[in-house]
Amino acid sequence: MNNFLNEEFNLSNYDKANLTKWSAHQEGAKMLPFWVADMDFMIAPAIKEALLAGVKGGRLGYGNVPEELNKVVCERLDRIYGWQVQPSEIIWKMGIVPFLCIISRTFAGLGGEVVVPTPVYYHLFNAPDWGGQRTIRIPFTGQGNTLDFDWVKIESTMKKGVKIFSLCNPHNPGGIVFKESQLNKLGDLCEKYDVLICSDEIHCDLILDENTKHTPIASLNKKLAARTLTLMSPSKSFNLAGLGASFCVVQNKAIHQKLTIAARGILHDPPTLGYRAALAAYKSSDWWLKELIIYLISNRDLVIDFFKDSSFFEVQVPHEATYLAWIESKKISTDKLMDLFLKAGLCLSNGKIFDGDKYFRLNFGCHKKTLLEGLQLIKKSIAKF
Ligand SMILES: Cc1ncc(COP(=O)(O)O)c(C=O)c1O
């Protein structure tokens, strides 16, 4: 096992105060954090070296997208998904959420309708809500791995005129990967009703099941490629969220141009250190990702096992992707539960923020010691019930 997974987890005082995940406090007492989607592991050595080289060089002005980075991304998309993307089809900006917002405003317009299946990572519905679009939330049918789109509602909504379908695949917080059959069916509907697809695939590298394969919806066929904006980034898989190096693949020239113009002066380019880190991640750190995934699989199994016989909680399984477990609270409201967790010194995410009442989300992207401590505290927090 590699050092980054074993490494003693020491945070500086600056980190403790200023890393969002670790800065949660309740009346002065420190909280053990299982909320924000960051992992606790040390970044890959090549990334650290690239960042140190950038800092040592001492030039931190504006940066261009390194040609090599686009080349590496295109090769990677082809190698992993058989998806042919050209460097000119990639737009780099700082952060996926700003992309979600600008896409919603630019392509749905004021009052334009955006379909968002829920529960989902909240910025998928915040983006159209904030932008003056009309967000149509359509609850998923089924649970866990049976999570499916409500095809009837989706089609009846599309019939009335929808501009964008907002997809989160792999799914946060559900932990599943949509099957090709589901993506094809969705693609057919978007084609039939002329709906653009905004596909947030930020978690695509974090597949925890060897029988599960991620498929970018745009890679399915040329027609879908022409109506899809695909959002990706090394932020989650390589733990670089604070550097904001994110990209959008747009293979339709008119949409590409419209997005480029709309982003001017609003979406910032990634910092030069972000580009350096992204290149080192995609070019030299796949071995790190492989080791990480083995560790995450054992953490996921630990979580599932821990709650196996619980009458209070049910972990949604199979869990195919992401380091975020989606857990149903069967007896206590999640508001009450969050209260109990806070009192026990735990910070988790209330499912309500994802439009998923009765659920909470647990980030298991941490060292086993931390995870075990957290799980024991969860158990203790509900002991009186
Ligand atoms: C599905 C999804 N999209 C976007 C983001 C945030 O992306 P960014 O920090 O690049 O804006 C997250 C963070 O957890 C996420 O889970």
Image (cartoon, rainbow, N blue to C red):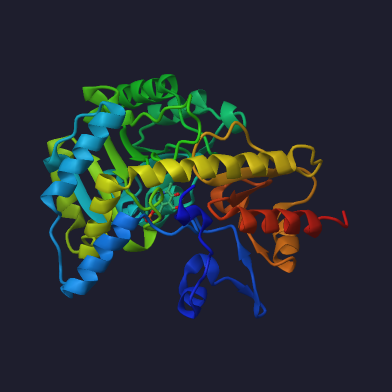
- Percent coordinates x, y for residue 215 in the rendering: 36, 28
> Number of numbered discs present?
0
With 31 as the anchor, is 176 left or right in this view?
left
- Percent coordinates x, y for residue 156 in the rendering: 46, 26
- The residue sitting at 34% across, 43% down in the picture is 286
- The residue sitting at 46% across, 27% down in the picture is 212
With 283 as the anchor, is 116 left or right in this view?
right
With 335 as the anchor, is 56 left or right in this view?
left
- Percent coordinates x, y for residue 250 in the rendering: 21, 39
Q: Nearer the viewer, residue 158 or 38?
A: 38
Q: Quadrant of residue 206?
A: top left
- Percent coordinates x, y for residue 14 in the rendering: 46, 79
Against 359, is 210 above or below? Answer: above
Against 357, is 162 above or below? Answer: above
Whether residue 324 is visible, yes or no, is: yes
- The residue sitting at 44% across, 23% down in the picture is 182
Against 134, is 378 above or below? Answer: below
With 316 as the anchor, is 92 left or right in this view?
left
Q: Residue furthest right?
A: 384
Q: Nearer the viewer, residue 302 or 114?
A: 302
- The residue sitting at 17% across, 45% down in the picture is 70
Whether residue 194 is visible, yes or no, is: no
